[in-house]
Amino acid sequence: MIFHLVPLADWTAGPERPYAPPSLDSEGFVHCSADPGTALAIASSHYGGVRGTLLALELDELALTSEVRREGETGARYPHVHGPLNREAVTRVWEVVRAPGAPARLIPWRPES
C-alpha cells in the first residue's frame, strides 16, 4: 500500500475520472508516501496552511494502472506514480486530523450524506 494526500475538494471534483493532481502536469508524477507515518509527516510539514478537509488515499500499488517508481535515495519512502490515479486502486480513504500543537493523525473518512 502507498498513500497520497489530497484536499477533499480536489478528490471529489470529477469523481467519474481518474484523479490527476497538478503535480502530474508540472512534475510528471503524483507524489505518494510508502507508509502512514511518512504521509502524516508530510501532512504536518507541507499541508499545515491548507484549509479544509485533507484526505489520505490508501492505494493498492498492484491495482494502479500507472507505473510506480521508487526513485533516488528517498524513493522507498516517497514513491512516484507516473500517471493519473485510477479510483479503483483506492482501497481506503482516511481523513487527516490536524490540530494546533498536536501531531496529525488518520481516522476513517466518512463522507457526508
Image: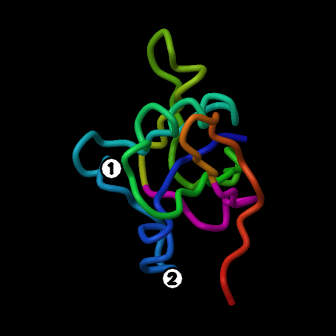
User: On the rendered structure, is 25 left or right of 12?
Assistant: left
Q: What residue type is labelled 2?
A: Glu
Residue at numbered disc 2? 16
Q: Which residue corresponds to the image point at 33% horizontal and 49% vertical from the top-left?
A: 24
Q: Could you say which is closer to the camera, residue 101 or residue 89?
A: 101
**Percent position of residue 110, x then y:** 73, 72
Which residue of the protein is positioned furthest toward the front in this rendering? 101
**Magenta part of the protein: which range?**
84-95
Q: Which residue corresponds to the image point at 49% horizontal and 9% vertical from the top-left?
A: 73
Q: Which residue corresponds to the image point at 50% horizontal and 67% vertical from the top-left?
A: 8
Q: Is residue 92 magenta?
A: yes
Screen quadrant of the C terminus: bottom right
How far apart are the alpha carbons under marks 1 and 2? 18 Å
Which colouring convention does the figure follow? rainbow
Q: Is residue 12 above or below residue 51?
A: below
Q: In this view, does 101 lie above or below 96?
A: above
Q: Is residue 89 above or below residue 36?
A: below
How many tags in the picture? Answer: 2
Check whether the beta carbons of the residues at disc 1 and disc 2 lie within 8 A of each other. no
User: On the rendered structure, is 108 left or right of 74?
Assistant: right
Which residue of the protein is positioned furthest toward the bottom in this rendering? 113
Residue at numbered disc 1? 24
Q: What residue type is labelled 1?
A: Leu
- Specify few, some or many for label 2: CA neighbours under 10 Å numbering under 14, 14-19, or 20 or more: few
**Percent position of residue 37, x then y:** 68, 30
